[in-house]
Image (cartoon, coloured by chain):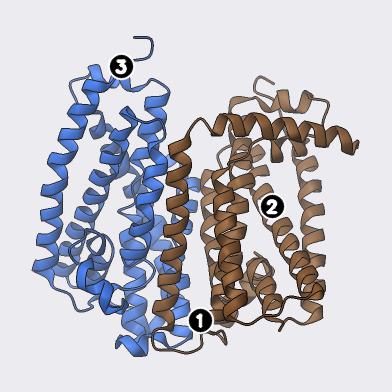
Chain colours: A blue, B brown
Amino acid sequence: MLEYRVEIALWAISGIIPFFMLNIWTNNNLNESINISDVLLSRYFLCAFFVRQFSVVWVVFSFEEDSLMGKVSPYLIQPLNPFFRYFAQHLAEQITRLPFALIIAFFFFIFNQESIWIPNLGILLLSIVSTFFSFFIQFLMQSIVACLCFWTEKASSIERLLFIPTLFLSGLLAPVVSFPEYVKSWIYFTPFPYLIDFPANLLSGNETNISGGLSMQILWIFLLFPLFKKIWSEGTKKYTAMGS
Amino acid sequence: MNLRKYLKIYKKFLHTSLASELEYKTNILVDLITAILSLAGSIFLLSIFFQNNGYIGGWKFEQALIIQAIYTILNGITNTWFNPNLTEIVKHIREGTLDFVLLKPIDSQFFISLKKINPSGFLEIMLGFLLSFFCIRINQINLNLSFLTLSLITISCSICILYSLWFFISTTTIWFVKTWNAIEVLRSFLYIGRFPLNSFSFSLRIFFSVFIPIAFITTIPSEVFLGVSQLWKIVLEIIVATVFLITSRKFWLFALKFYSSASS
């Protein structure tokens, strides 16, 4: 992974959209209406950037390429679910991404000195756990989509469809608190606010329901995991290697 | 440059790539839903911004919708032509097939930029046009000849700038081999084009008009739509577009000098 330093740096840069959003929010004083101070809002978006960096998932694209190229067949013979392989890849890349994310955070603090804060250790650990949960939920969702490769050639277009609600409802572009009432009434029943909004609120010290958020994350993991198991076993039954 | 020959070749390109893309019919449907949802999502985001404010950066909600419409049209064009073709450059260089492109008796930039087409982008372009007609109605813009020509000129300039940016980044593949992520960076910057430039702070505004001219891509055409654009801005956009086009061409020819095929 360290061989591709430039790539990973670019990946980190491509995640800076939350900072542009922050700029719109503060520059137009939009945060006054939702009762979040400038400082807390800038911390929120910084945390959203961090959570996004460490929960981004691309398993569907890897799996699609491997399955179209016929590389899945040798993986299936091995006594290990091939998704473990992708899981390990994701974790390894997240670790290499840490220094670049820290550099971006450093620059962020140079420009926004008043928003420097140090979360206490307990909160930090909890938010690392919840970021990992968020990553795991997304990994499961995308693996389920990836398993559709057994039925259709282009599962990645379904993933792009699923990415739209993730982008707009997860809190990456605007904190969920600011959403209008008619969205807030149902959004907490979907997995989306627990992907970015909840861990980011937790880490940045904004108001949030810690136990409720964590239990919802665990609930979604318990719902999605059997579904993934099911679709995987169905898919492998359906799978025919090239040439058979 | 034989124009007729190139037109004929382009017809063949269209035919083959349409035929292959239409094999995936459900894919096109999924892409259409994606485009609609993505537009709905951005309008939702915009509505959050305008929830308690009448103006953002001097733009009303109805006026900001024009930017969304133009962004959607341009994004459709990107998905139809730029994205399928220019991401292919990366593949050509990694697999060494650029040699075959260079050996063909037609212009390599022409071949590389227009070989493929993704028909699902058309739906997005149509969506953008629908939204812009809606905007014309709610903003009570009267259609006259000068409005039409000016908006046509500015939008075509935007397309040229956008194309040059994409082509520029893809060309750097010749040195860096893998530029998927550079393309992602460009994509995330282009996302800014969904919002009026004035809603950003001064330093970002400078950045987005000098280094990456996103300001020119959507804001100026939208100002033309509203009839508030000054003439110098339009002239500037034309100059920027020409400069970008010429540099991207020069840069491609320059980069080719550094291209060594797979085994050499």
Query: Disc 1 or disc 2, which is closer to the eye?
Result: 1
Q: Is B185 left, or right, of A25 in this rendering?
A: right
Residue in the picture at 30% in, 40% down = A145
| Disc ID at residue B61 | 1
Outermost residue, right side: B2
Q: Where does the image place residue B258, in percent across and percent down from the top left? A: 74, 35
Chain letter belonging to callout 3: A
Residue in the picture at 39% in, 84% down = B51
Q: Where does the image place residue A94, in percent across and percent down from the top left? A: 33, 49
Front in this rendered view, residue A29 or A116? A29
Q: Is residue A118 visible?
A: no
Helix, strand or loop for disc 2: helix
Residue in the picture at 67% in, 31% down = B15
Type of amino acid under label 1 = Phe
| Disc ID at residue A240 | 3
Q: Quadrant of the C terminus of chain B?
A: top right
| Disc ID at residue A92 | none
Sequence-wise, which precedes: disc 1 or disc 2?
1
Chain letter belonging to callout 2: B
**Disc 1: CA contacts within 10 A as few (<14), some (14-19) or many (>=20):** some
- Name the residue tied to disc 2: B163
Q: Where does the image place residue A90, in percent across and percent down from the top left? A: 31, 42
Circle 1/circle 2 CB separation < 8 Å? no
Type of amino acid under label 2 = Tyr
Residue in the picture at 37% in, 26% down = A67
Type of amino acid under label 3 = Thr
Q: Where does the image place residue A93, in percent across and percent down from the top left? A: 35, 44
Front in this rendered view, residue B106 or A116? B106
